[in-house]
Image: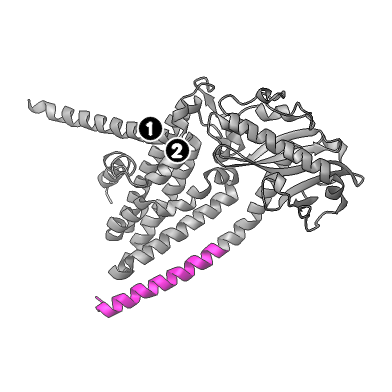
Amino acid sequence: MPGIADRRARGLLLLVLLGIVAAAGLSWLQAQTAQRVREHEARLLLERLREVLPPPERFDNQPALDRLLLTDPRLGSERALPVYRVRRNGRPVAAVLTVVASGYVDEIRLLVGIDAGGQLIGVRAIRHRETPGLGDGIDARRSDWIRQFAGHGAGAGLALRRDGGDIDQLSGATITSRAVVKAVRAALAVFAERRAELFASTAGSDGLESPP
Amino acid sequence: MTDANATATLRGGLWDNNPGLVQLLGLCPLLAVSTTLVNGLALGLASLAVMTATSTSSSLLRHWLHPDLRLPVLVLLIASLVTAVDLLFRGWLFELHLELGLFVPLIVTNCVILARAESYAIRVAPAAALADGFAQGLGFAAVLGGLGALRELLGHGSLLQGADRLFGPVAAGWQLQLLPGEHGLLLASLPPGAFFGLALLVALRQRLAQRRRAAAAVPET
């Protein structure tokens, strides 16, 4: 049996060695998975974008890469949010705005596809924490509710029925439904007002600040 | 390690000394993630992997552990293994990772893992520690999966919703709609449903255990 001081030294050595091995092993593993994670993220973004893009024959660029960061408090966040531009022969076809709605539980992040004429191509919730069974109907995997926005413009019809429009609300989730409608209206308003500016810059540009 | 020992260890993890139903340890992830069978099973399997690896490696290192430095070494070990599992999850089960989010890294705070490593694994040979970690992990995964199945069935009327996120595209059609999902018991999907569900499972286990004890006592009369 080693002496007491020896045992303590051995224990300490073990702690140090284990720390080094763990750090090295984990850095290696992270390097191995980083590429896969990036691929997953890109694929997920593409899948989500596809649902709010015009039919593929109507554009010829890669919207996921033609990204612009837009800062406008009307979109529900003080932070810059990504906008994906859709073009054909360089001319604007549509844009996909990211909007943040304040839902019943937490923020709801929406992708809003708007064609050049200011009509909605589609809306999808990409991140939310709404109540299961009620507000989570905004998720296209749970219900078709969010699909009814397609084809709407910024007119009076874009409101819940009880507010005088023609959007059916999710039953039992008035706050959630209203928040989504409000955020979609905001996206349309920002698009209408800043359209020229949105399409003016080319891919990889730094982003636009909110107007003074 | 004899077969009888292995059976007793397995029985301990799954029934007699189940971490979720008897020791009532690791309840935070248990209650938060058990919304569906697939979610519960995924976190259960991740915990199972971490527990087996932790128990085995702490047993291997047991002669090197000084009492004063035992806790820091075990914590470092558990943290590294959990980080590794988290990275693997993100790389290979990306969509499931999005849903489980913070709860994969939070496996590190699951006290069952440290408790088994500290109270058992560092006192026995690696084979016994491996069996114990595996059995306890299996017991925990079973409770997570069972509670997830119960809540999914009551809340959505389905089972195996989103199975493809855990088992790959093969499982895309595995979802079973057993009851109409429209009018599910909303409470079951909400956080309080987790508490009620767990209480029901604990009560059920107690009743079965009592009955078995009573049956064993009968021959004497």
B134 vs A57, left or right, is left
A36 vs A175: above or below: below
Q: Main secondary structure of the magenta part?
A: helix
B10 vs A17, left or right, is left
Q: Position of residue A205 (x, y in %)?
A: 81, 57
Q: Nearer the viewer, residue B107 or A120?
A: A120
Q: Dot 2 surroundings within 10 Å: few (below 14), some, or many (20 or more)? A: many
Q: In the structure shown, which secondary structural element does the residue marked by tag 1 occupy?
A: helix
Q: Earlier in the sequence, mark 1 or mark 2?
A: 2
Residue at (42%, 47%) from the top-left corner? B48
Q: Position of residue B44 (x, y in %)?
A: 44, 43
Q: Which of B134 and A183 is in front in this view?
A: A183
Residue at (38%, 46%) from the top-left corner? B137
Chain of the residue where label 1 is placed in the rendered structure: B
Distance of label 1 from label 2 (alpha carbons): 10 Å
Chain of the residue where label 2 is placed in the rendered structure: B
Q: Give the range drawn in magenta.
A: A1-27
Check if mark 1's residue and mark 2's residue have beta carbons within 8 Å.
yes
Q: Do labels 1 and 2 share a chain?
A: yes
Check residue B104 for magenta coloring.
no
B187 vs A186, left or right, is left
Q: In the structure shown, which secondary structural element does the residue marked by tag 2 occupy?
A: loop
Q: Where is residue A154 in the image (x, y as percent from the top left)?
A: 79, 33
Q: Dot 1 surroundings within 10 Å: few (below 14), some, or many (20 or more)? A: some
Q: Residue B34: which disc?
A: 2
Residue at (33%, 60%) from the top-left corner? B59
Q: Nearer the viewer, residue A163 or A124?
A: A163
Q: Residue A53: name its quadrant.
A: top right
Give the amino acid at mark 2: Ser
Q: Residue B197: which disc?
A: 1
Question: Total label count?
Answer: 2
Inspect this view and state whether residue A53 appears: no
